Amino acid sequence: MRYSTVSVNNVGLFIIAEVEEVCKRLMSHKGVEGVIIINQEGIPIKSTLEKNATIHHSAHLHQVAQKAKSTIREIDPQNELTFLRIRSNKHEILVAPGISYRIIYTVGI
Amino acid sequence: MRYSTVSVNNVGLFIIAEVEEVCKRLMSHKGVEGVIIINQEGIPIKSTLEKNATIHHSAHLHQVAQKAKSTIREIDPQNELTFLRIRSNKHEILVAPGISYRIIYTVGI
């Protein structure tokens, strides 16, 4: 099967539209303070935070998600990480790993 | 102030008794499949799992908890990790970081 660049670009456009929609929907939820969407390499695609915070948070949270994902696989190779909740004194960070991107959002406590 | 070895041993005995109690209480909750209690270095103190699984799970989950803890501090040095939930297709692993030990328990889905 030959993938034409048009279809690859369409996939890209589709994901960007989807990411915008996800971001808007999450930010409409009460208590959601910020949303970052990263690709599978941890690079931010979309964010409601300012630039430095986005880059900083993405890098660190991507590593935690990767570590959690590999741990689940280490414990049981037939199992898969579906969600991660990191609660702290000030807020809760939720990470939803997806196939083409990861959704990270912060909820105030 | 001089700490006699007796008082240090008492602290040890107190923690062991507390750990036993925590383990019993958690295992009495519906859905809880297993409990591991580790010290701050990730060494298991108490476990309801068999030996190899205990050692394997402890090592990996300790690293995820450490990574989550340092990430929270990196994002905000005034903040502190209070709880970690790692959800997968088969179960949810919950990690409660404490001062002298960490409680890890698995809940079926």
Image (cartoon, coloured by chain):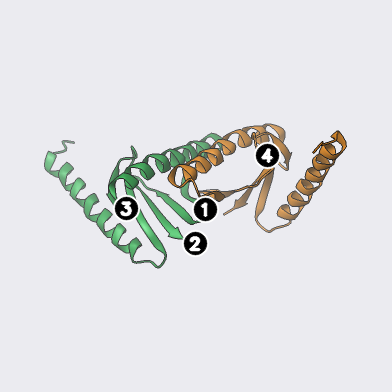
Chain colours: A orange, B green
Mark 4 belongs to chain = A
Q: Secondary structure at mark 4?
A: strand
Of labels 3 and 1, earlier in sequence is 3
Label disc, if present, on residue B87 of the rendered structure: 1
- Count neighbours of disc 4 (C-alpha within 10 A) and say few if under 14, some if 14 to 19, many if 20 or more: many
Kindly identify the residue that appears in the image at 68 percent across and 46 percent down.
A35
* Residue wearing tag 2: B109
Tell me the distance, in whole angstroms, between the alpha carbons under discs 4 and 1: 19 Å
Kindly identify the residue that appears in the image at 71 percent across and 33 percent down.
A51
Q: Secondary structure at mark 2?
A: loop
| Labels 3 and 4 within one chain | no
Tell me the distance, in whole angstroms, between the alpha carbons under discs 3 and 2: 18 Å
| Labels 4 and 2 within one chain | no
* Residue wearing tag 3: B49
- Count neighbours of disc 3 (C-alpha within 10 A) and say few if under 14, some if 14 to 19, many if 20 or more: some
In the displayed structure image, the side of residue B104 where residue A65 appears, left or right? right
| Labels 4 and 1 within one chain | no
Q: Position of residue B38 (x, y in %)?
A: 32, 45
Q: Quadrant of the N terminus of chain B?
A: top left
Q: Position of residue A73 (x, y in %)?
A: 49, 44
- Count neighbours of disc 2 (C-alpha within 10 A) and say few if under 14, some if 14 to 19, many if 20 or more: few
Tell me the distance, in whole angstroms, between the alpha carbons under discs 3 and 1: 19 Å
Contact between labelled residues 2 and 1, with CB atoms less than 8 Å apart? yes
Q: Is residue B78 visible?
A: no
